[in-house]
Structures are given as C-alpha cells and as structure tokens.
Image (spheres, helix red, strand yellow):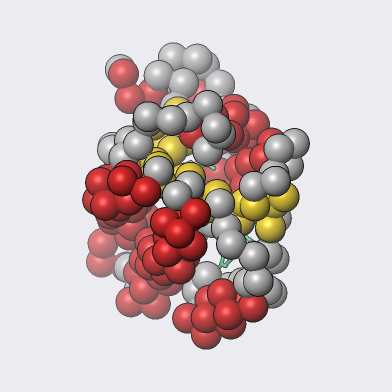
Amino acid sequence: MRIALVTGASRGIGAAIAAQLASDCKVLTPSRAELDLGSEQSLESYLAGLDQPIDILINDAGINRIAMLENIENKDLDDTLQINLLAPFRLIQFVAPQMKARNYGRIVNISSLLSVVSRAGRTSYSMSKTALNGMTRSLAVELAPYNILVNAVAPGYVMTDLTRQNNSATEIDKISQTIPIQRLAAPQEIASVVAFLCSEQNTYLTGQTIVVDGGYTCL
Ligand SMILES: NC(=O)c1ccc[n+]([C@@H]2O[C@H](COP(=O)([O-])OP(=O)(O)OC[C@H]3O[C@@H](n4cnc5c(N)ncnc54)[C@H](OP(=O)(O)O)[C@@H]3O)[C@@H](O)[C@H]2O)c1
C-alpha cells in the first residue's frame, strides 16, 4: 500500500484530501504539534522520526496574512514564505531521494488562484504561491526521469476557515457572483483533482499548475 504524507490535514482542503486518499493509501497527517512548518527545528525532528518512505507528498498547509505593502511586518512575510514555500521545498528535498530509489513518486503542492491573479493586501501570499508554481515546474523537470510527477493545484475560493477568516459573509456573497459557477468550491472538489494527480491513473501529467476556480480566471 502506498504511503501518503499530507500537511495541513487537520481541517479544510487538507482534511478533504486526506479523506479521499485514505481509500487507497496509508495517510500520515501530522498535527501542528508534531510538525510545525514554521519551525526548522520541528521540521528536522519530524523528518528524523519518519521511519517509512513516502510515495505521495501533499503540501497543503498554508497561511494568508493580509496586509497592504506599507504594513507588511517582516515576521509575517518570513512566516508566509517559510510555511507556504520553504517548508514544502524542505519536505520535497527529504522525500525525493526515497522516491528516486523506488522509481515512483507523486507530489502535489497546493498553490492558489492568487498565484496567477491577485488582490490588494495579498503580496506576501501571492509571492509565496507564485514561487511554489515555479518550484513545481523546475522539480517536475528534474524528477521526471525517476517517475516522480510534481504538480500544483491552484484552488479558487473554497469554503474553509481561511476564506471565512479573510472575507466577511457579504464579501463571500459578492465573490460568489463573480464566479461563473456562482458559488465557492467545497474542499472535496479540490481534493478530487489532487487525488487524480497522485493516483496510478496519472502517468503523464507533470509540472502543471491546475487552476480549479469555477471559471473565475476565464472572465
Ligand atoms: N480556502 C481557500 O479558498 C483557498 C484558496 C486557494 C488556496 N488555498 C490554499 O489551500 C491550502 C489549505 O487552505 P485551507 O483553506 O484548507 O486552510 P485552513 O482551513 O486555514 O487550514 C490550514 C491548514 O494548514 C495548517 N497550518 C497552518 N500553519 C501551519 C504550520 N505552521 N504548521 C503546520 N500546519 C499549519 C493548519 O493547521 P492547524 O489546524 O494546526 O492550524 C490547517 O490544517 C493552503 O495552502 C491555502 O493557501 C486555499
């Protein structure tokens, strides 16, 4: 049975991904107490304790602290880049040699609609997610000869705590009207795309950022 590691699986999109993968894989879902992506020390000690090779890695955990340019605190920018970009890089760097040795791997980085378009106050977040797309492309090229496929999924607006925290109910209603499908996504609708990308059915799709946004970016 394949072993999957999903970060950010306590809730939201990560929880939906872990639930879908659980039908075919053994899924590791470390809590933040076990793996705090904001802490190098926590990353090192979690990885040192991993005693099974990972076949599927889903970098889902992420933060989005909103601030206009003049108000962006160094700490918030550092945390955003650390959690959304550098920790996923570190996890891939750790699992890739194991995947190479077994000639199999599926990696999905959860990016965002805001890596291809943006909004005021989202500079740190957009920086981190756009870089994540670039990392996805480069690693896809490097790891393809070892049957390791690396993709990003960029969700549009999904009904999770993160969206409720950053948008009022009125804003969510307004956003819904700007989406061709006329509603936000459910976490399961993102998870099913991720599940395909890291399934045995995906044998040729790599290096892509797949935007799952109900048609938002087509307008
Ligand atoms: N919701 C959207 O509309 C949307 C749109 C585009 C992209 N995304 C992306 O999708 C991913 C999941 O978003 P979501 O909406 O499901 O978020 P969410 O409901 O806010 O959940 C965030 C998850 O990340 C974990 N996390 C945050 N900081 C962490 C840290 N320092 N160490 C370890 N885990 C940490 C949280 O753990 P705790 O439970 O311990 O806090 C939680 O499991 C993120 O990468 C986000 O940027 C979301």
Question: Relative to 99, is 159 on the left or the right?
Answer: right
Which residue is nearer to you in this view: 119 or 107? 107
Where is residue 213? Give x, y as percent.
44, 27
Check the image and report above or below for 71 versus 176. Answer: below
Identify the residue at horizontal 46%, vertical 21% (top origin). 214
Where is residue 16? Give x, y as percent.
67, 40
Question: Relative to 17, is 96 on the left or the right?
Answer: left
Check the image and report above or below for 165 versus 112. Answer: below
Which residue is nearer to you in this view: 93 or 176? 93
Which residue is nearer to you in this view: 126 or 98? 98
Q: Is residue 83 visible?
A: no
Check the image and report above or below for 99 versus 199. Answer: below
Question: Relative to 76, is 138 on the left or the right?
Answer: left
Check the image and report above or below for 48 versus 129. Answer: below
Identify the residue at horizontal 68%, vertical 58% (top origin). 29
Q: Is residue 14 visible?
A: yes
Name, please, the residue furthest toward the bottom. 41
Identify the residue at horizontal 52%, vertical 81% (top origin). 44
Question: Relative to 177, is 26 on the left or the right?
Answer: right
Where is residue 55? Give x, y as percent.
56, 51
Where is residue 142? Give x, y as percent.
26, 52
Q: Quadrant location of the C terminus? A: top left
Q: How many marks?
A: 0
Identify the residue at horizontal 37%, vertical 48% (top origin). 146
